[in-house]
Image (cartoon, helix red, strand yellow):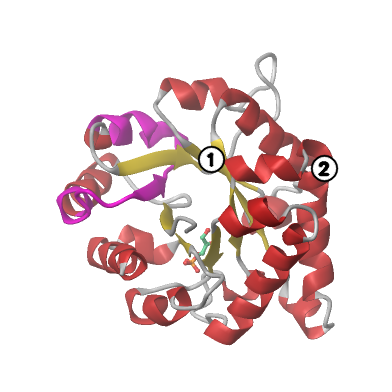
Amino acid sequence: MRKKLVAGNWKMHGSLTDNAALLSAIKPALAGMEAVVCVPFPYLAQVQAALSGSSIAWGAQNLSDQPKGAFTGEVSAAMLLDFGCKYVIVGHSERRSLFGETDAVVARKYVAAQAAGLTPILCVGESLEEREAGITERIVARQIDAVIEAAGVASLARAVLAYEPVWAIGTGKTATPEQAQAVHAFIRSKIAALNATIADGLTIQYGGSVKASNAAELLAQPDIDGGLIGGASLIADEFVAICKAAAN
Ligand code: 13P
């Protein structure tokens, strides 16, 4: 059976003080349970110190596609490894829409992450206009194809996918379980057409306004294998409840 995995994406939130409180609340509550927190770069050392030896893994929210060099402001995969990261989010819709990351850039970052031994959490998803135009599947397929072309379908054995409809991110508007399941099933069947074993084993998270109150019904869908959690990952009780819903 494929693994259910919940990851928190803190985005550009947190402070040393707030993080310490959040981490000290979630660590004992999730003892023995697998979960991930993806935190801003400056807090990786703090998270490493707080979570080392626990069942919670950590990661970053972005990385450079370059290994090193004169790239002011960038952070390499090797640097993330230095701080014990296991995961890195790649291609989040905020990176795509606000920072101009194209499918090609996202694919290069995915390759760089895997080359260093990090597990990319590859985000895909359509905008509201794209959904209303009826082209959700075309958009998601294009985003996934860019990565498959760059890295091959077998690379998905070392990745996590996250379906995040852009219109559901930070809006309080969650996709219904049926809407989310339909896209997850589409993604899995698309990959299965290339490699059924890889598709069957692939963890596909749903992201977009997941909360403790709606996690169970989303996670009950057959092709939803966990969640990528924004706002609710900053609230200890919410994040813990979502992780527990995934474990049940
Ligand atoms: P929210 O859970 O705040 O909607 O954010 C989802 C997200 O973008 C996670 O990557």
Relative side of 106 to 217, left or right: right
| Dot 2 amino acid type | Ala
* Residue located beneath label 2 in the image: 104
Counting from the top left corner in percent of width and height, residue 36 is at 39, 48
Q: Does the magenta segment cover residue 48?
A: yes
Against 245, is 9 above or below? above
Q: Seen in the image, is 127 located left or right of residue 14?
A: right
Amino acid beneath label 1: Val
In terms of image quadrants, where is residue 176?
bottom right
- Answer yes or no: is residue 205 visible: yes
User: What secondary structure is marked by label 1?
Assistant: strand
Secondary-structure class at tag 2: helix
Q: Which residues are magenta?
A: 26-49
Res. 153 image quadrant: top right
- Does residue 46 belong to the magenta stretch? yes
Indicate the quadrant containing the C terminus: top left, top right, bottom left or bottom right: bottom left
